Image (cartoon, helix red, strand yellow):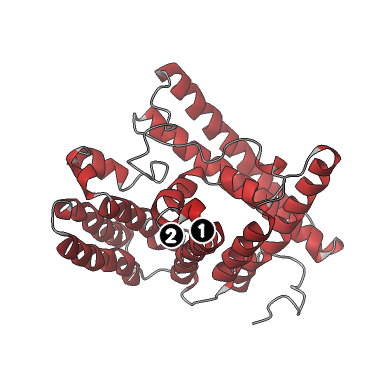
Amino acid sequence: MPFGGVFAVLGIGYAAAVAFFLARGWKPGARSAAFILLGAIVLGSPLLLETDNLALRVVVGGLLPMIFLPHMWDLHLDPARGNRLSLRAYVVFVGNYAWSVARVAGGYGQDLSFPRRLLDAGRYVAGLGVVTLVTVGVFQVPWAAYPFLVEHAVKSTSVTAWALWAFQANTALWRLAGAPAASFTTGNVLGACRPADFWRRWNRPMYRWLLENVYRPLGGHRNPPWAVLGTFAVSGLMHEYLFTVTFQRVTGYPTAFFLLHGLVVVLTRRLRPLGALVLPAAVFTFAFNTVSTLLLFIPLHERVRFYVNDVPPWLPWW
């Protein structure tokens, strides 16, 4: 597919997402119909991609629709906000992953001075360059000399670190351009003492969106177990779409990953490790996260050889 065709696919999805702004003042039934129609165009636009380039399929076919559609849904749930959010602001909002919920005003970095925003942008872009070099180096290690789980732990951790710095750089660049943007993480992610703590710190833009648009509508603190499970199920379906578009087949692994984490969050949400239990709890949380990411990297390995060692036969159990 010509490179210009990629921009055409991107343009269709983006135009459909922006067009939903016009429906903000419609009656609920008509607005819902517009959301379904335009949302189907957004999600269906990657069908026009005719490329085996995984990077293009991830970004253009998977990630961008998963930015457009949640922003449309955020406006759909609070249409009156359309009177306060101009079309110009919405054009930025709908494509800005780090500005996930327009009704939440704080924590988007707009109070930072320009020198601070410029410094942050330079720091995170430079850091991303360093982390990229380290990650490339990790994949050059002769991993055949090490056990499979050691290879997985090091590679998954390095890829996760790369993603963290990439999204932090994205946030810093949006802020530098003057747009609202939330930090990708808060606090020390590696210091999370239980899965619930990890998910509060990791991917703050998506955390905010799920909190406002899924968790609270499902009952929130009035019904925490079902609200948590429903929230992780929605997140799983969103990642399932991303994997399906990228690998051109349904795997089920991303949904399983997020349902597993949702269940563990429900089971451990009342635990509060203190004193000598903090370090073991943090180690357990890190180990659980690392092992469970096998559900995310196995589909990748089936398409591109991610591991040097052979995947143990008991892992792809469906």
In the image, what residue occupies the spot 58% across and 67% down? Answer: 259
Which of labels 2 and 1 is toward the front?
1
Question: Considering the image in quadrants, where does the C terminus appear?
Answer: bottom right
Callout 2: 10 Å neighbours few (<14), some, many (20+)?
some
> Which residue: 63% across, 41% down?
131
Q: Residue furthest front?
A: 222
- The residue pinned by badge 1 equals 223
| Residue 132 or residue 235, whichever sits in front | 235
Residue position marked by numbered label 2 in the rendering? 218
Residue 102 position within the rendered picture, expressed as x and y whole percent measured from the top left: 33, 41
| Amino acid of disc 1 | Asn
Q: Relative to 271, is 14 on the left or the right? A: left
Name the residue at 50% across, 71% down: 247
Along the line of sight, which residue is nearer the eye, 163 or 257?
Answer: 257
User: Image height check: is 158 above or below 237?
Assistant: above
Residue 315: image location, x then y, percent: 72, 75
Q: Secondary structure at mark 2?
A: loop
Residue 256 is tagged as: none
Q: Quadrant of the N terminus?
A: bottom left
Q: Say which label, 2 or 1, has the lower sequence index.
A: 2
Check whether the beta carbons of the residues at disc 2 and disc 1 lie within 8 A of each other: yes
